[in-house]
Amino acid sequence: MGFIKESNRSRVLIIYFLISSMLEILAYAAGGVFETLAAWVWLCTAVILGILFLYHTGKQAYRDIKGKKYFVSFGFLVLVILFFSFIGNVGYADINPDATQQTAAGLDSFSNAGLNYTGKAFLGYPVRQYTIAAIPALLFGRSVWTLHAGFGFYFIVGLVVFFLGLRSWLRSKDIKEEYALLPCFSLLCFPFISEYYQNFEQAIIPVSLTMLAIGLYLKLLLNTDMKLYIAIVWTGCLMADSYTPVLASMGLLMVFILLLNKYKPATIKAETGKAVITAQDTDYCDEMLRDIPEKKQTSDTDELITRGEEQKQSHKAMNISLEMMVPVGAVFSIIVFFLATFIPGRSDRLTEFREEGSLLDSIFTSWTDFFTDTNARFLGLFGGVLLLYIIFSIAGAFKLHDALLSLWVLAVVFISDYMTGYTAYEKGWILQRNMIVIPVLLTGIFIVLMNFLKKHELKIPVFIQGIVLTLMLFAGLFNFSQQHRSFNYFRFIQPMKHLISYVGDTLNEQGLKVTDEFNLVVYTDNILEQNMFDYAKFFYPNAKVYIGLENIYPEIEDEELITFIYADDTRLDRLIPESDPSPGYIKTMDAAMYKRESYNKRYKFTAEWYRKIVNLK
């Protein structure tokens, strides 16, 4: 926003924070036009920030090509392609019935002027996070690819900004930028990242927003640009309206925003001569000099320069005061967005904790289980390194912010385990709440390592970097190929994603759209696969869904609609009517049955689905 003078930017930011905060309060308190206005300001800001993200990412790629920085650019491109390759990849990635409900709610929000801005959706979570996830489906239609992309892009955008922020920090320290690849590739070594990324559901949003916030903060340290400030506050406000674990990241972000002026690198400006007249001071001096006779100008110049310098110092003091207020305004805005959801009542049981044993025993057990991978492999090979970083940080071996990060991690580990949530989740499942600590710990350790290398003038040879990154890449490929180790529910519903793919191909064969009306009947004895209603909310919003019991033909309300019948065995040739045979039943028994086999690469089995198509017209 170069059209705004630098001296006025602090004022503009403070006004922006106040207006957006007031709009948020009015949206919840009064609704109506205020909700609509707040919603579209929020969404338009997201679109503008998205455009800026594409611009700056493209600009950095151009600089890398022009500067022949092939190692750093190609290395990161490999990482992005790897994550991108799982979007729409049914052989490995899941089709999550929770994600279909979430994205469907996001799509529904676009059907009203206020975007259901203050509304709730899946399990009572704020709908705003799903509105963002629904944008690919809004633009390109309902499909497996757009369902995955809605949540996958959260992660990829967060990863890219994380990478660019690390590069900016390294550049400011005059350290080789390719080192930024190390923490990014390290993400591949954490099994929970690969598992929940392929799940493509709201559980990946907290770690995505955490990476986004880290990247923006590292850039904001070096350049307190208006766009960066708005971006990081918008991110913090979205954290307030997203899946519960990210609230811990929101709290940490607010603390570091308040510490921004402490951690900003000192800027030293050289001044020559008795006084310096800046561009904004010259207007004042020129105006005064015009009123002085030419002969007196020489003798009075020193006095005017002194007066100009005094005015400069006065303006500078005022600007410093305003600049100090900007972080406070940013944090105030984030707090308002959180309170707007908290005061009316959040549905994620934010203040409910389990009451088992003493608090000290619970703390000790949580930390022990976490660092020893007792319930599931969370830290893996990095467990020892991360534990040493935490111990030394708290002991004061590193900087104050390292101790702060370590204490925050310990608090997150305990609270995530101690919170009740919606049900009595298995310990391995609960661990996904801790994914937010991974990029935070990686950043802290990375900065310690880089400062050590800088201090001792050491460098990591390129071939060593290449070996380490290659090993991390293979670790990631291994993790992506593994079956679910935390979200075990998905072990038992793998055939469903192949059914969804089969139905989509059937609609294409018949020249129908996913939004057309049709009957959809599914037969399966697996109770965990009898939730086609959840999938249909996103994929087939106007379909009439029936779950067949045993081999009984259901009473279909409108048999004039084309009917697609699927089963996971051959029962379609052995159906019996529930009452008198209907025309639909008779036509079904006469229809040819087709079989489709789909190989599941991740679980290494072949899913079988049988199909009949019935059209009475």
Image (spheres, helix red, strand yellow):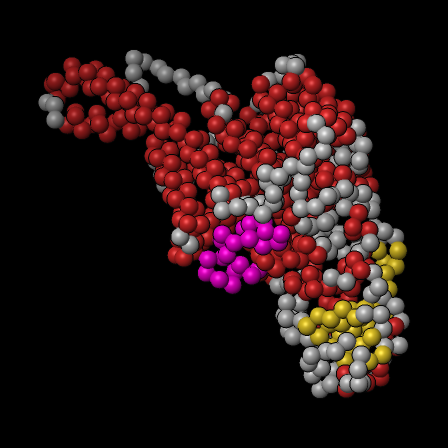
Task: Tell me if residue 125 comes above or below residue 520 in the rendering.
Answer: above
Between 453 and 598, the residue placed more toward the observer is: 598
Q: Position of residue 440 (x, y in %)?
A: 64, 31
Q: Is residue 439 left or right of residue 555?
A: left
Q: Position of residue 484 (x, y in %)?
A: 80, 46
Q: Residue at x 88, y 77 (%)?
A: 573
Q: Is residue 148 left or right of residue 28?
A: right
Q: Is residue 95 magenta?
A: no
Task: Tell me if residue 189 comes above or below residue 499 in the rendering.
Answer: above
Between 526 and 101, the residue placed more toward the observer is: 526
Q: Residue at x 39, y 44 (%)?
A: 22
Q: Is residue 124 magenta?
A: yes
Where are the magenta residues, as a range? 107-128
Give the total of numbered labels: 0
- Say which quarter of the image contains residue 173: top right
- Say which quarter of the image contains residue 451: top right
- Say which quarter of the image contains residue 205: top right
Residue 185 visible from this viewpoint: no
Between 19 and 480, the residue placed more toward the observer is: 19
Q: Position of residue 271 (x, y in %)?
A: 37, 16
Q: Main SS of the magenta segment?
A: loop
Residue 86 visible from this viewpoint: yes
Q: Position of residue 249 (x, y in %)?
A: 59, 35
Q: Quadrant of the C terminus?
A: bottom right
Q: Residue at x 59, y 17 (%)?
A: 399
